[in-house]
Image (tube, rainbow, N blue to C red):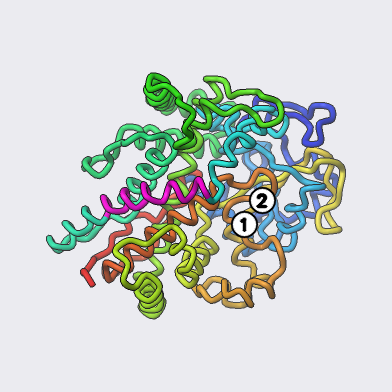
């Protein structure tokens, strides 16, 4: 299990015990919460567990055990919430806050107190959030649109070559290149040259390595980790060093250019903007951590979202035709869509949302009690007790989504259907004050790219392909390839 090196009270009170907090410490009536059968003394709930797919494992247990359950391994126990009603209760910001644990804490050696990995009490999180939030407002977003189009053009050049040659495209690989180049260029003015490479850029290899290592640390018990993960730890240290070195070079190059006062991107904001109230500026170390956070989080989840959406579009010819008709109609007569044209693709946005519902690429988030409380009016929690919300299970709860919750239906996100559902049952970007700061960036980018691809190509899946999902903290279709034909 992950080890957390520090902790503080979510309400600013006395510090909570450091390290991993097992469920026994925070749930007074833990015995009332079901757990998998065949629990083995000392080892815990390891029978039938799949080390490489722990999220999908937990989703299976949610189906079997109900909306709340627990799993135990090597003496440490975690409470999972998959029911939509309980997850909605955990979204109450007056009673619960973000909990940094499991794989997120394992990323702290490289991301430190970045926006995603910071503990709630760490001041650099709020400082960076307040400085960077304007970089995701409408005017700034409109400025990124041109660069997004340029990167998408590099993708379509590559796909045109594959189409002419009659070759299938590697969807996850190409979406990863696209989203990395997009966040690198719009956020930091850096070009990784991903589309000129047959192999992933070393930065991507290092990034995937750190994510995979963090995931492995979730399932290897603490006492055995130094022995079991000795070689993996050395590789992870090399990966982290490469990430830090690359980011330092990007920052140094920008500093050498001189500021000039123009805020072209997120990096300019980090280097030039002070907090609007305190006047405080981001330190060099904080800037490095925020850049790494944005490069990792800003491409990994969006590439997965695009890949899952393309998979569903290729499988459902009716949905594909309806989405293509909308793109053709809304963007008719325009060689390139303007910024405001993207939000007009309302049905395509539903396709994206439905893909994120079934396969939220950030598959879970943890919440901890700000003070003693009772979850769902039934389960007492002490201050600091935490639970892991399984977004995939919450998004497929029949009580919120109907008896066909496992099926793909973009019309679930018709405005009338959305208004008829309970609040807080759709959370692909987390919840509350610590929800993803780049949500609108990701949605604009993904909708734009899907629109451009559907206007240009017909999509067909490879015969016999069955969706397999890889887990490396985020979710990604495995081995997904599509055949193209120009429209």
Quarter of the view holding residue 134: top right
Q: Position of residue 130 (x, y in %)?
A: 64, 36
Query: Range of the magenta residues?
Result: 139-155
Q: Are marks 1 and 2 in contact (CB under 8 Å)?
A: yes
Residue 384 is covered by the magenta coloring: no
Q: Quick one: SS at disc 1?
A: loop
Q: Where is residue 267 in the image (x, y as percent from the top left)?
A: 47, 31
Observer-nearest residue: 72 or 107? 107
Q: Position of residue 251 (x, y in %)?
A: 42, 24
For the image, the number of numbered tags is: 2
Q: Quick one: SS at disc 2?
A: loop
| Left/right of residue 295 with respect to residue 428 in the rendered view | left
Q: Name the residue under label 2.
A: 431
Q: Where is residue 483 in the image (x, y as percent from the top left)?
A: 24, 65
Is residue 231 in view from this perspective? no
Q: Mark 1 points at which residue?
A: 427
Observer-nearest residue: 131 or 66? 131
Observer-nearest residue: 66 or 73? 66
How much space separates mark 1 and mark 2, taking CA atoms? Answer: 6 Å
Q: Residue at x 25, y 57 (%)?
A: 169
Q: Residue at x 85, y 41 (%)?
A: 371
**Does 361 appear above or below 187?**
below
């Amino acid at each position: 299990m992950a080890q957390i090196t520090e902790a503080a009270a979510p309400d600013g009170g006395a510090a909570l015990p450091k390290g991993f907090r097992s469920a026994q410490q925070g749930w007074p009536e833990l015995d009332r919460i079901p757990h998998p059968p065949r629990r083995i003394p000392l080892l815990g709930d390891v029978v039938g567990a799949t080390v490489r797919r722990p999220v999908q494992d937990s989703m299976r247990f949610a189906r079997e055990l109900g909306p709340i359950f627990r799993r135990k391994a090597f003496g440490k126990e975690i409470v999972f919430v998959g029911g939509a009603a309980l997850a909605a209760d955990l979204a109450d910001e007056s009673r619960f806050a973000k909990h940094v644990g499991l794989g997120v804490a394992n990323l702290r050696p490289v991301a430190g107190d970045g926006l995603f990995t910071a503990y709630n009490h760490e001041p650099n999180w709020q400082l960076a959030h307040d400085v960077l939030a304007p970089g995701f407002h409408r005017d700034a977003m409109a400025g990124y649109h041109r660069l997004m189009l340029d990167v998408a053009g590099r993708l379509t050049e590559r796909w045109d070559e594959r189409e002419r040659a009659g070759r299938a495209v590697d969807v996850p690989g190409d979406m990863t290149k696209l989203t990395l180049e997009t966040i690198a260029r719009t956020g930091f003015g850096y070009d990784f040259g991903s589309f000129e490479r047959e192999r992933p850029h070393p930065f991507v290899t290092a990034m995937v390595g750190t994510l995979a290592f963090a995931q492995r640390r979730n399932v290897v018990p603490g006492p055995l980790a130094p022995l079991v993960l000795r070689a993996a730890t050395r590789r992870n240290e090399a990966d982290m060093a490469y990430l830090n070195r690359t980011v330092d070079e990007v920052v140094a190059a920008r500093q050498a250019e001189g500021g000039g006062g123009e805020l072209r991107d997120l990096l300019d904001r980090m280097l030039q903007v002070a907090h609007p109230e305190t006047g405080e500026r981001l330190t060099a170390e904080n800037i490095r951590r925020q850049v790494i956070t944005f490069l990792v989080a800003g491409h990994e989840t969006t590439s997965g979202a695009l890949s899952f959406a393309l998979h569903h579009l290729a499988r459902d010819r009716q949905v594909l035709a309806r989405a293509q008709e909308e793109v053709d109609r809304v963007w008719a007569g325009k060689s390139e869509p303007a910024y405001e044209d993207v939000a007009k693709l309302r049905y395509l946005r539903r396709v994206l949302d439905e893909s994120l519902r079934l396969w939220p690429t950030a598959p879970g988030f943890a919440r901890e009690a700000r003070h003693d409380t009772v979850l769902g009016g039934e389960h007492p929690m002490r201050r600091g007790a935490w639970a892991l919300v399984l977004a995939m299970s919450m998004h497929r709860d029949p009580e919120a989504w109907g008896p066909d919750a496992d099926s793909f239906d973009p019309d679930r996100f018709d405005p009338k259907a959305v208004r008829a559902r309970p609040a807080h049952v759709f959370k692909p970007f987390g919840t509350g004050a610590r929800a993803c700061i780049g949500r609108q960036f990701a949605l604009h980018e993904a909708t734009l790219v899907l629109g451009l691809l559907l206007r240009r190509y017909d999509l067909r899946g490879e015969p016999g392909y069955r969706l397999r999902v890889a887990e490396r903290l985020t979710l990604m279709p495995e081995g997904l390839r599509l055949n193209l034909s120009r429209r």
